[in-house]
Image: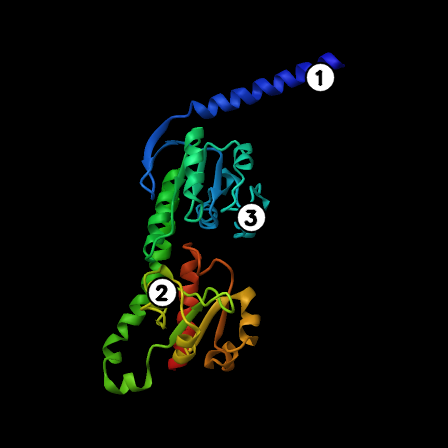
Amino acid sequence: MKKIFIISLIFLFLASCKQHTANQAQETYEYTDDYGQTVAVPTHPRRVVSLSPAVTEIMFALGADSLLVGRTEFCLFPPEARGIENIGGISNLNVEKVLSCRPDLIISGSMVPRKIVEQFATMGVPLVSVIEKQHFDALYENIAKIGGLVGHSQQADSLNRVLRARVDTLLNQQSSMSTLAETPAYQTRHTKPTVYYVVGYGSGGNFTAGGNTFINDIIEMAGGANIAKESKGWTFSVEALMQSDPDFILIRREDSASFCRATPYSQLSAVRQGRTIALEDGILDLQVPRNVDVILRLSKAFRSTAE
């Protein structure tokens, strides 16, 4: 019995070595990622670990989720992602846990510390960074990049065509109203609703998305005017918020109730008039296909104030 057990262990060890060798022997090509680092990426990756909720969501949208063998604890959309091995946090990444997934490709986002990226490089494990960009159109670029990395370029092209068509339809509808909107009578009755997006609030400070963010682009594409557009950072004073008194408040669903009860935010017109839009996590603060859904949803809400 003992002899059989030892033989079994040897067999498992050899099988493991064979898998490792197969991974090492894959054909690769040089890829320059968003941080400018050149990485030897496998042509046909079979085991991918995602270190970004946006990457995970895009891979599911591309139908490439079967390649995922690891994801962070923040990769929660779609719900099926929860069934993939959880490798833990992002800023406090557990390198050993990631390696235990035996990835032949790791795709990272904006939040992974640079020292972690360099650590994987020294280990010979290909890690590619696909980061979120300042402008909305970069969504299409990131989808194409991830699609190419995981062998789903055609699916990425198809997804981008669908997303672009939905956005173009909305923008064309808005454009068709431009001539009418230039008349003084129309402008007297119809103005863009002012909008504030809550990133953080309370004693820890007030934070929002300024004009140099894709979130600002989303608000404007939906027909709104971001009151923090001139802000280049993420901080925004409570005094400026109260003085602007925006028509709409956008906030994550889990923060909505407490925000509306808190002082002085409860005195905002948008709160008192029921124009606080509670959004599901990730739909606006991640650069993902669901951004198009939120553009259409916000557009409908904003139009209601002008009718």
Residue at 53 percent of width and 77 percent of height? 263
Quarter residue 187 falls in: bottom left
Numbered disc in front, either 3 or 2: 2
On the picture, is 202 further left or further right than 305? right
Tell me where residue 259 appears, x and y as whole percent: 53, 72
Front position in the image: 201 or 305: 201
Quarter residue 195 falls in: bottom left
Question: Alpha carbon of mark 3 to alpha carbon of mark 2: how far?
Answer: 28 Å
Res. 73 mark: 3
Tell me where residue 104 appears, x and y as whole percent: 46, 31
Q: Amino acid at mark 1?
A: Phe
Q: Secondary structure at mark 1?
A: helix
Front position in the image: 270 or 154: 270
Quarter residue 180 falls in: bottom left
Does 287 appear above or below 221?
A: above
Looking at the image, which residue sits at the far top? 3
Question: Alpha carbon of mark 2 to alpha carbon of mark 1: how far?
Answer: 63 Å
Numbered disc in front, either 2 or 1: 2
Name the residue tied to disc 1. Answer: 5
Looking at the image, which residue sits at the far front? 203
Residue at 54 percent of width and 70 percent of height? 256
Q: Amino acid at mark 2?
A: Gly
Name the residue tied to disc 2. Answer: 210
Quarter of the N terminus within the rendering: top right
Numbered disc in front, either 1 or 3: 3
Front position in the image: 87 or 178: 87
Q: Secondary structure at mark 3?
A: loop
